[in-house]
């Protein structure tokens, strides 16, 4: 696989996070003002990328720049995805190896989707995926797809970090990852963010992200429970009802009102063999 993540990419993303924290706090330094370009956040980031060797173009397994014709092949149409990938890794606390595993899973998902649309070479899993003869990478994934892939792959790879990634990445990037930017929410001055480098959010941001995940997760949990309960024998349901009435100290009358059944219907069900 051709990867766009490296230790240098992680370090550059950390520097961008520190800059964004300073901007949110209203304490930009001289370097920030020198590279600031409000109309083009991508150009602003490019000046930071340029400070780190080895992340100006795609590289192969042995670190050799990949060329198409006579020029170096760029990272793909969505160059901001490079920082998004780094931010996911930083929020999840991953090293480069884990980040590349995540990257590969996202690229594979998109490649399978693209296979239905364009000619994409998926023949050898150990070789770069090619689209129209060019390497197909993480930066070929549009943001609407990438959002879904990040959530789906996080659920499989590291579900305990979903909240952190939602707070530090999914909730902060503008809709268009090609031209948009990462915007840290402003909070009252003096509050300490979790980490200016890796997780530039507050406890409140994490709580909001968890609430959103819980809100999304509840209907699925209820559906799953309803599906499972279809196969529970009536005798088990009756036992659960009795246990619930005992543990909650709820009367039969209150239970019938809460479940919208009559007492006669309740008695008939409980007495049925």
Image: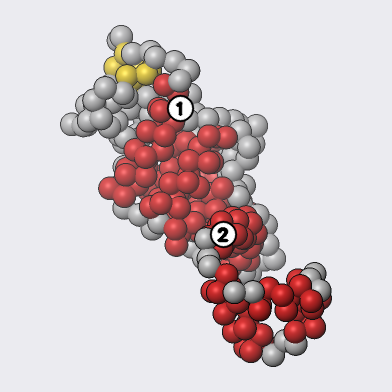
Observer able to see residue 170: yes
**Residue at the spot 79% in from the left edge and 78% down from the top edge:** 263
Dot 2 corresponds to which residue?
230
**Residue at the spot 18% in from the left edge and 31% down from the top edge:** 62
State the image quarter where residue 244 is shown.
bottom right
**Residue at the spot 43% in from the left edge and 46% down from the top edge:** 153
Verify CB contact (< 8 Å) between mark 2 and mark 1: no
Q: Position of residue 156 (x, y in %)?
A: 41, 51
Q: Quadrant of the N terminus?
A: top left
Q: Position of residue 85 (x, y in %)?
A: 43, 42
Q: Please tell me whether residue 168 is drawn above or below residue 235 in the rendered image.
A: above
Q: 91 or 8, which is in the foreground?
A: 91
Q: Position of residue 152 (x, y in %)?
A: 47, 46
Dot 1 corresponds to which residue?
113
Residue at the limit of the structure toward the left, as seen here: 62
Question: From the viewer's perspective, is 175 left or right of 156?
Answer: right
Q: Please tell me whether residue 212 is drawn above or below residue 147 in the rendered image.
A: below
Q: Position of residue 218 (x, y in %)?
A: 62, 60
């Amino acid at each position: 696989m051709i990867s766009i993540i490296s230790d240098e990419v992680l370090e550059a993303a950390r520097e961008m996070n520190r800059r964004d924290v300073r901007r949110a706090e209203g304490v930009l330094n001289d370097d920030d003002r020198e590279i600031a370009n409000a109309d083009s956040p991508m150009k602003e980031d490019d000046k930071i990328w340029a400070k780190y060797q080895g992340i100006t173009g795609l590289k192969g397994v042995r670190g050799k720049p990949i060329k198409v014709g006579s020029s170096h092949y760029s990272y793909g149409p969505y160059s901001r995805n490079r920082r998004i990938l780094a931010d996911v890794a930083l929020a999840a606390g991953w090293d480069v190896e884990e980040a590349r595993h995540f990257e590969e899973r996202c690229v594979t998902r998109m490649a399978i989707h693209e296979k239905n649309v364009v000619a994409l070479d998926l023949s050898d899993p150990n070789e770069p995926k090619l689209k129209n003869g060019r390497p197909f990478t993480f930066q070929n994934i549009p943001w609407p797809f990438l959002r879904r892939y990040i959530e789906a792959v996080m659920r499989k790879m590291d579900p305990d970090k979903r909240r952190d990634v939602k707070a530090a990445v999914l909730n902060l990037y503008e809709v268009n990852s090609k031209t948009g930017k990462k915007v840290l929410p402003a909070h009252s001055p003096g509050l300490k963010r979790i980490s200016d480098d890796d997780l530039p959010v507050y406890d409140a941001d994490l709580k909001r992200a968890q609430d959103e995940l819980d809100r999304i997760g509840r209907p699925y949990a209820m559906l799953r429970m309803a599906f499972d309960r279809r196969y529970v024998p009536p005798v088990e349901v009756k036992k659960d009802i009795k246990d619930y009435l005992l543990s909650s100290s709820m009367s039969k009358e209150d239970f019938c009102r809460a479940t919208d059944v009559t007492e006669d219907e309740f008695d008939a069900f409980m007495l049925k063999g």
